[in-house]
Image (spheres, rainbow, N blue to C red):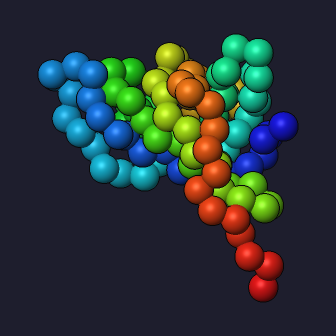
Amino acid sequence: MYEGNLVDLQMAKTISADVVLDDTTHRCQVYKYDIEEDYIYLQLKEEDLTVISLDAKYQCYISTKKEILYCTGVVKERYRSQTGNMVVFRIENGFYSVSEKKDS
């Protein structure tokens, strides 16, 4: 459904007191979207997987051809595979439309 779309992932708040709030925008691409489980499998474009915390809530912005979708959630897992650095993102409360893209 969203496979191949670009994603901006940003930390919204920390869950653990040991985690420092990171305001960096991490670039990803949707590898797979599991609509039944509300998981998005993201391919992280950065080399270092440890920049993504398992103890934080994130905002996820998905750029589609017509609009930008927004959701919040947590990272359940991060790992390296043959495909690249993968992040398993658990969506909370569904998607919201941020804006519609205008054709130039």
Q: Quadrant of the N terminus?
A: top right
Residue at the outermost bottom position: 104
- Where residue 40 sits in the image (x, y, percent)? 66, 28
Residue at the image position 33 percent from the left and 21 percent from the top: 55
Residue at the image position 29 percent from the left and 34 percent from the top: 13
Compared to residue 60, the image places residue 75 above or below, namely: above
Residue at the outermost left position: 17
Q: In this rendered view, identify the residue nearer to me: 28 or 85.
A: 28
Compared to residue 92, the image places residue 58 above or below, namely: below
Report whether 76 appears left or right of 31: left
Q: Quadrant of the C terminus?
A: bottom right
Q: Determine which quarter of the picture holds residue 36.
A: top right
- Where residue 53 sits in the image (x, y, percent)? 36, 28
Q: Determine which quarter of the picture holds residue 29.
A: top right
Asked whether residue 45 is in view, the answer is no
Residue at the image position 80 percent from the left and 79 percent from the top: 103
Report whether 53 appears left or right of 100: left
- Where residue 26 sits in the image (x, y, percent)? 47, 48
Compared to residue 80, the image places residue 7 above or below, namely: below
Q: In this rendered view, identify the residue nearer to me: 9 or 36.
A: 36
- Where residue 43 sits in the image (x, y, percent)? 63, 37
Q: In this rendered view, identify the residue nearer to me: 97 or 11.
A: 97
Compared to residue 33, the image places residue 25 above or below, namely: below
Asked whether residue 72 is in view, the answer is yes
Q: Determine which quarter of the picture holds residue 50.
A: top left
Q: How many marks?
A: 0
Q: In this rendered view, identify the residue nearer to me: 90 or 99.
A: 99
